């Protein structure tokens, strides 16, 4: 029996990233409030938040300092744009902070409102920059299969997932996808992680040579692939990729939308995995998701080209109304202050061994082919046969079913096909981490019983 709210939802909303046909039957999970690492539905049921919303509520759901900061900024200056050289305190302060903590030398910051628009900005800057440098043929951008970079026309083109392309007439021409560096899935039998990484780098180089190095402008990658299934890179991967990009003067864009601000056990995933990034995109945890805000951080070389171009043609013709929104920037400044004061990176490092121990222990379960993670992000791969790594038919929905059982157990997770992600608020404590995995173990047992009853095994 659907609740009144659920019925009203079905009658009014088109949900993002939802099976719209199934939703008409099942209706929504209506969440009403949150406290710390817990959220509560409209019946008062409590859920442990295993996904930090959508990889973003690092400080949980009831951080009074963030709420008060937003309120105070709303009272003082609820909006001002930063077009035409206008500015305000929070935008400047945040940019200074970001420069201070950036994992690679950063010269300037450009604001947006979402991860998608940050990556759109990255693409536009790459194109603009290469026109300015008098090499208009150097425009192609390479991303990776299973990479996730957003949903705007251009950032969805970067995304390497079929559902973001099929019937949307994407990807755009000039955006190419190289192999996904998932060792468990794509390594040859007996191939070491280092050898697999070398093969991935060689494939990238072959693609660049095939296309013509003078036509390839940039490469974009997440330090840990998020929506593709929480996939950590194999040993040596980024070191080898860096070398290929440097050889052909190809810009490296690090998409830190999920990994930025402590998630991997360093402030940035770029540090954890040694990406030689020229520019970075961040969003989500920059405000602990209490306000929509994104930032592109660019190095001096990129910035100087933009300035030169302005000398020639005038205005840099890009930016949106909410770029540098004062409330978002003030909340971000406070968020970064809390991360530093509360030593969030040290906290992640101290609880990560428990997180990873419990995560990898899931591999003992008959349904789990691989469990992988770093810091406080991880993924499990559900399989029909562990010996052969054979998958279930994707339309049987085994991953989503396990997430539904987790929900019954009072745990929120996210399934991407048969890959299930764990990405809890960074403030989660050890006892809550243990509880999270206890709940998912029970959910997996229920999934196994269900799969047997359905004849899937
Ligand atoms: N890049 C990455 C790595 C992401 O995980 C996401 C969102 N999950 C995006 C970009 C897009 O961000 P948004 O949904 O805010 O547009």
Image: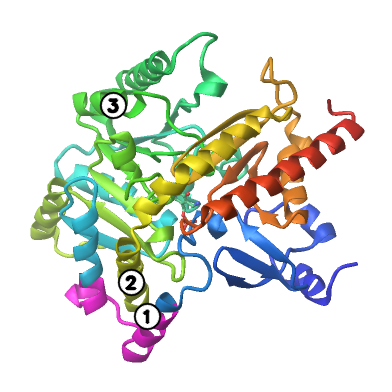
- SS category of the residue bearing label 2: helix
- In the image, what residue occupies the spot 36% across and 67% down? 335
- Mark 3 residue crowding within 10 angstroms, few (<14) / some (14–19) / many (20+): some
| Circle 1/circle 3 CB separation < 8 Å | no
Magenta part, dominant SS? helix
Left or right: residue 17 versus residue 3 is left
Do we see residue 170 in this rendering? no
Callout in the foreground (2, 3): 2
Q: Which residues are magenta?
A: 67-92
- SS category of the residue bearing label 3: helix
Counting residues from the start of the chain, the first of labels 2 and 3 encountered is 3
Callout in the foreground (1, 3): 1
- Mark 2 residue crowding within 10 angstroms, few (<14) / some (14–19) / many (20+): many
| Circle 1/circle 2 CB separation < 8 Å | yes
The percent position of residue 450, horizontal first and vertical second, equals 86, 38
Q: In the rendered view, would you say 387 is above or below 106?
A: above
Q: CA distance from mark 1 to mark 2?
A: 7 Å
Q: Is residue 290 magenta?
A: no
Q: In the rendered view, would you say 224 is above or below 403?
A: above
User: Which residue does the numbered mark 3 point to in the structure image?
Assistant: 239
Q: CA distance from mark 2 to mark 3?
A: 34 Å
User: Which residue does the numbered mark 2 point to in the structure image?
Assistant: 334
Q: In the rendered view, would you say 77 is above or below 43?
A: below
The percent position of residue 407, horizontal first and vertical second, equals 73, 55
- SS category of the residue bearing label 1: helix
The percent position of residue 348, horizontal first and vertical second, equals 41, 50
- In the image, what residue occupies the spot 50% across and 22% down? 183
- Observer-nearest residue: 207 or 15? 15
User: Which residue does the numbered mark 1 point to in the structure image?
Assistant: 69
């Amino acid at each position: 029996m659907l609740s009144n709210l659920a019925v009203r939802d079905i009658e009014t909303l088109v949900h993002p990233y939802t099976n719209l046909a199934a939703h008409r039957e099942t209706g929504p999970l209506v969440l009403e409030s949150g406290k710390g690492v817990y959220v509560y539905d409209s019946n008062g049921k409590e859920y442990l938040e295993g996904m930090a919303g959508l990889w973003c509520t690092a400080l949980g759901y009831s951080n009074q300092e963030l709420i008060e900061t937003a309120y105070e900024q709303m009272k003082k200056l609820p909006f001002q744009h930063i077009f035409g050289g206008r500015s305000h305190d929070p935008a400047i302060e945040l940019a200074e902070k970001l420069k201070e903590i950036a994992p690679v030398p950063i010269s300037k910051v450009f604001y947006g409102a979402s991860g998608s628009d940050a990556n759109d900005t990255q693409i536009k800057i790459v194109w603009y920059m290469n026109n300015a440098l008098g090499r208009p043929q150097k425009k192609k951008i390479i991303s990776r299969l299973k990479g996730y970079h957003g949903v705007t026309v251009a950032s969805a083109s970067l995304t390497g997932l079929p559902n973001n392309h099929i019937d949307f007439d994407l990807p755009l021409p000039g955006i190419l996808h190289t192999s996904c560096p998932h060792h468990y899935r794509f390594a040859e039998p007996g191939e070491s992680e280092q050898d697999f990484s070398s093969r991935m780098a060689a494939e990238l180089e072959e693609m660049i040579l095939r296309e013509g190095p003078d036509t390839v402008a940039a490469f974009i990658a997440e330090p840990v692939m998020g929506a593709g299934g929480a996939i950590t890179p194999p040993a040596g991967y980024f070191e080898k990729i860096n070398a290929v990009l440097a050889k052909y003067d190809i810009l490296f864009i690090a998409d830190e939308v999920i990994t930025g601000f402590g998630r991997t056990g360093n402030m940035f995933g770029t540090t954890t995995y040694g990406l030689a990034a020229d520019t970075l995109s961040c969003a989500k945890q920059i405000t602990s998701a209490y306000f929509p805000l994104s930032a592109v951080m660019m190095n001096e070389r990129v910035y100087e080209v933009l300035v030169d171009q302005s000398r020639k043609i005038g205005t840099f013709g890009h930016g949106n109304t909410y770029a540098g929104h004062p409330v978002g920037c003030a909340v971000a400044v406070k968020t970064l202050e809390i991360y530093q004061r509360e030593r969030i990176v040290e906290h992640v490092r101290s609880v990560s061994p428990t997180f990873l121990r419990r995560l990898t222990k899931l591999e003992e379960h008959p349904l789990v082919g691989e469990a992988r993670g770093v810091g406080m992000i991880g993924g499990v791969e559900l399989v029909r046969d562990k010996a052969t790594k054979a998958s279930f038919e994707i339309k049987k929905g085994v991953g989503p079913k396990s997430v539904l059982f987790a929900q019954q157990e009072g745990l929120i997770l996210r399934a991407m096909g048969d890959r299930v992600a764990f990405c809890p608020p960074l403030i989660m404590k050890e006892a809550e981490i243990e509880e999270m995995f206890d709940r998912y173990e029970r959910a997996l047992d229920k999934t196994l019983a269900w799969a047997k009853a359905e004849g899937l095994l």
